[in-house]
Image (cartoon, rainbow, N blue to C red):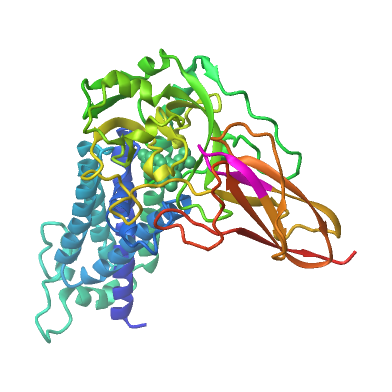
Amino acid sequence: MSDDRSIQNRAGIAGAVAAAVALGAGELPSALAGEATSLVSVVASRFIDGFAASLKDIAVALFGTNDKVALIVGIVVVGVLAGFLLGRLALRSFGYPVAGFAVFGAIGLWAGISDPQASAGGTVAGVVVGVGLGLVTLAALLRLAQGLPVLPDLADDAVVSAPAPMTGVPTAPPDAPGAPASPVLTAAADPRVKTADRRSFLVASGTAVAGAGAAAIVSRRLRSTNVVEAARAEIELPTASTAVTPPPSGLDIPGITPVITPNEDFYRIDTAIVVPQVDVASWSMTINGAVDRELTFTYDDLLARDLVEVPVTIACVSNEVGGGLVGTALWQGVPLTELLDEAGVQPGGTQIMGRSVDGFTAGFPTELAYDGRTALLAVGMNGEPLPARSGFPARLIISGIYGYVSATKWLSEITLTDWETEHGYWIPRGWSKEGPIKVTSRIDVPKRRDPLAPGTIPIGGVAYAPNRGIAAVEVRVDGGPWEAATLGESTSDDVWVQFRHEWNATPGQHVLESRATTKDGDVQIEARAPVAPNGATGFHRVLVDVPSA
Ligand SMILES: Nc1nc2c(c(=O)[nH]1)N[C@H]1C(S)=C(S)[C@@H](COP(=O)(O)O)O[C@H]1N2
Ligand SMILES: [Mo]
């Protein structure tokens, strides 16, 4: 490898390392300030809000955990690759990386300032520290890459043969067209620096990367010293004055979904890159808009009220038939209509729009809250204060409509507005304005690869149509006749019901299917439809293989 090429490569590495340092160091100030958001996370959030969601076909999923990890990794990779290019360009002029790092800093600044959860101070400090340390690292590594000591001294100046610029970096002026080697390359080609240590460059780069990693890890640690967990441990939920009889233990089939989903197993879907850490002592929730009186409630105000406890199955519109983005919890809270009546809904308030501390919104028709269905401002989940990921300190739970139009977590505001001009977060991004949950059933057992034997095998699963209730579930094998399954004890129309069917399995491959019917006579649709724009349809099909005995 020629000296030129090797210097070019080292300059690229220097740039990549400098970008890593900028990203790592940029995480620290906001973490030290106790903020949940970081520069990378606010950029990811803006990306979700601005771009990803509008790529409807690609981003149909409403942001599960994996999408978020992929997004963060993508941002870091793009940053480091850009750093590599800027490092190479730095050999022509240090102005390139200065401009490049400034652009990335500006993106971080813009994202942080437009993020409701990030502070301006934390954002500015992160950008200044990140960009500053990144450029200093790049300058130092570039000198090492060329076999020069990190800090210029008189002897070097002689070698470089050009005055060190103000940044202390031995940049060459942009080469004139056709000009021979720049002074920088001259320096590297100089026999006195030929012996210059590739090792010292690698050691310095490694140290810088380790420092960047350490900054990122320390920041993560700082953010996870979790304000919410500490606050939750102190909270004692009052006993609910009315509670729906605890759901039955359920059908005894190994592997069937339990009626109540434990909090730690509950699915999580939201646009939040970092789970909002709401300080319950300063938190309050306001009901405003088309109401006679604007009302504000603190957490203690809510706990002091008569709370009810109701099991409700909630589901995500992005749930595929047979998927896991659905769960049931005992939700404890205040009936929404009580609060709305105190505020006095005006005729113009035809839509109830929940708003989260992170800016997310979800709206549904006001008449749904008043049609007798379960509609709660929930503070408790399965006997505990809401976990942070599930919306602490308060969220909405409306039976029978998908989460994207109802279940606002980390609630900060309920605005009564009109139906026509205001739209929740997902509506302009291509999802239906109304989102009633489609009647669905799912086969939990047997699973595709379960070892089976000919003979009687229980087929078990769950069916749901919250608010409407399930009247029947049928099962068929290999497209044969539908046969009625036995239903588990029904908890209420808000809650999914387990089903069981004994199947006399014969050797060979078989297709198992289920379909559910609601109490109002709505039969699960056979035709397959994708999750966008208002929920998947089709039958859950499980292919099993029964070996001959
Ligand atoms: N603040 C906020 N609340 C939100 C969302 C969100 O992105 N942000 N997503 C909604 C969607 S799409 C669903 S399906 C439910 C999921 O609730 P869970 O995460 O508790 O299961 O939350 C709803 N509430
Ligand atoms: Mo969702």
Is residue 121 or residue 22 the one in the foreground?
121
Is residue 405 or residue 10 the one in the foreground?
405
Where does residue 194 sit, x and y in percent of width and height? 31, 75
- Magenta extent: 461-473
Q: Is residue 237 left or right of residue 472?
A: left
Q: In which quadrant of the rendered image does the C terminus lie?
A: bottom right
Picture quadrant of residue 225: top left
Where does residue 535 sit, x and y in percent of width and height? 46, 54
Question: For residue 472: magenta?
Answer: yes
Where does residue 471 sit, x and y in percent of width and height? 62, 42
Q: In which quadrant of the rendered image does the N terminus lie?
A: bottom left
Residue drawn at x 56%, y 53% as measured from the top left: 524
Q: Is residue 96 left or right of residue 196?
A: left
Is residue 127 or residue 113 the one in the foreground?
113
Using the rendered image of the protein, determine whether residue 194 is visible from the camera's viewpoint. Answer: no
Q: Hey, which residue is sitting farthest right in the picture? A: 549
Using the rendered image of the protein, determine whether residue 91 is visible from the camera's viewpoint. Answer: yes
